[in-house]
Amino acid sequence: MYFESGAISVPAGFDLSILNGSGSIQWEMINSTYNGGGGQNSAPFRVLLVGNGGQSVQADLAVGAGFFPMSGWQSFSVPLTTAAGGFTAGNVANFDDILANLERIEISVEFGSGRQATAGQTIAQCATYEYFAINGIGLIPPSILAQNNNFGTIDTSGGNVTTASVLGNDTLNAAQATTSNVTLTPGTAPTPGIGSISMNADGTITISDDASPGTYNYSYEICQTGIPNNCSTATATVNVLSNPQLAMTKTADDDELVTVGQVVTYTYRVTNTGNEIVRDVAINDVHNGSGPAPTPADETLFTDAAPTGDSTDGVADNGTWSVLGPGDVVEFTGTYTVTQTDIDNLQ
C-alpha cells in the first residue's frame, strides 16, 4: 500500500466538542495523472482526530472505485459524529473529550490497497501519482443564519415600546437561535434626532417615547457560542410613527383674595411632549372673568432640551412661538384686571 497524508495542528484550548453531531471535517485533494493499473481502494480516505492525551478516533470515507484521476481540486468531508459515516473506530467512547482537547487532525489517502505489480513494476510504481496534494484541511461548523426583521410601525404615544427579539427567525444548525447557543452583538445604534433606539441583550429593541419619527435600520451579528468565527449578520427595521403632542400649565401670581382693579399675571408653559417639531404655537385663553380675557404673549424659551437649538422664534413677543422642538418648553405671560363683577360672583 502507498499513502500520502496531511495534517494540521490545533491551537491549544480549541474546544470542538460543541460541534459534536453538527460540524464536519473538510479537505481538498488534487492529482493530475494516475500511472498505476489495477483496482483502486473504494474507501481511500482515513481521517484521524488525535487528542492531546494520545487518544484518537478514526473515520474511513468511502468514495467508490474509479474516482481517480481527478480533474482539478475536489472537496471531501466527514461529519463530526460517531454515527455511521462518521468516526466509528478508535476511542469512540471518549469522542467528546478528544474534540475538547484536540491536538491535530490527520488526513491520509491510500492509493494501492490489494494492488498487484506487473512485470518490471514495484508496488510503489504501480500506485504513483505524478502530482498529488492534500490542501485546506479545515472544519465546517454548523450552519448559522441571521435573517432580516421588519417590526413595522412603532407608535410611542403610550410610552417606550420594546419589540420582539431579532433572534425570533434566526437559526443555528436549523434550530432556533437563542442567547444560549449564539452570542448577539448589536451594530451601531440608530441616532434619531431626539430620543433613543437601543438593542437589548435578548435581541429586543427598545424605542423611547420621544424618538424622532422615521425609518431606522439596526444591524446585528450572531456567532455560535464557543466558535466566534461562525457568524451571520442581518438588519432589523423599525418605523417610528409621528406623534405630535403638547402639554400646558397655567399659573397665577396671586390665587388668594383679590381686589377690584388688581392686575393678575398668568404664566403659561407649553411643553412639546411629542416626538417631532411643532410650529406656530399660540394660546387662546378662554377666561371665565367678566372683563377682557388675557392675551398670552411675551413668549420666551423656558427649557431647551437636547438637542439644543432646535426651538426658535421668528418674531419676538407677538404671541406665537415659531418652532418648538421635542422636549422643549416655551413660556407666555398674560394679564387680567379684576372687576367688581368678578368679586361679586366669588362671594
Image (cartoon, rainbow, N blue to C red):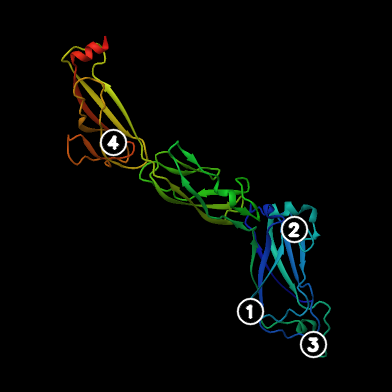
Position in image of residue 81 (x %, y %): 74, 58
Q: Which residue is mark 4?
A: 304
Q: Quadrant of residue 130?
A: bottom right
Quarter holding residue 157: top left
In the rendered structure, the answer to whether residue 273 lies left or right of residue 254 reads: right
Amino acid type for the residue under numbered disc 2: Thr
Decide: few, some or many residues near mark 2? Use Cα within 10 Å; few <14, some 14-19, many ≥20: many
Tell me if label 2 and label 4 are in contact, CB under 8 Å: no
Q: Give the Cα separation between the discs numbered 2 and 4.
A: 64 Å
Front label number (3 vs 2): 2
Residue at screen point 80% across, 59% down = 90
Rounded to the nearest angstrom, the CA distance separating label 2 from label 1 is: 29 Å
Residue 132 is at least partly visible in this image: no
Check residue 313 in the rendering and tell me which mark sits there, or answer none: none
Callout 2 secondary element: loop
Label 4 and label 3: CA atoms lie apart by 95 Å
Q: Give the numbered dot on residue 72.
A: 1
**Residue 200 image position (x, y, % from top left):** 51, 42
Mark 2 and mark 4 lie on one chain; the one further toward the N terminus is: 2
Amino acid marked by disc 4: Asp
* Discs 1/4, front: 4
Q: Which residue is mark 3?
A: 121
Q: Are the residues flagged by discs 4 and 3 in contact, CB closer than 8 Å?
A: no
Q: Residues within 10 Å of mark 3 (few under 14, many from 20)?
A: few
User: What's the distance in space between the residues labelled 3 and 2, CA to CA?
Assistant: 41 Å
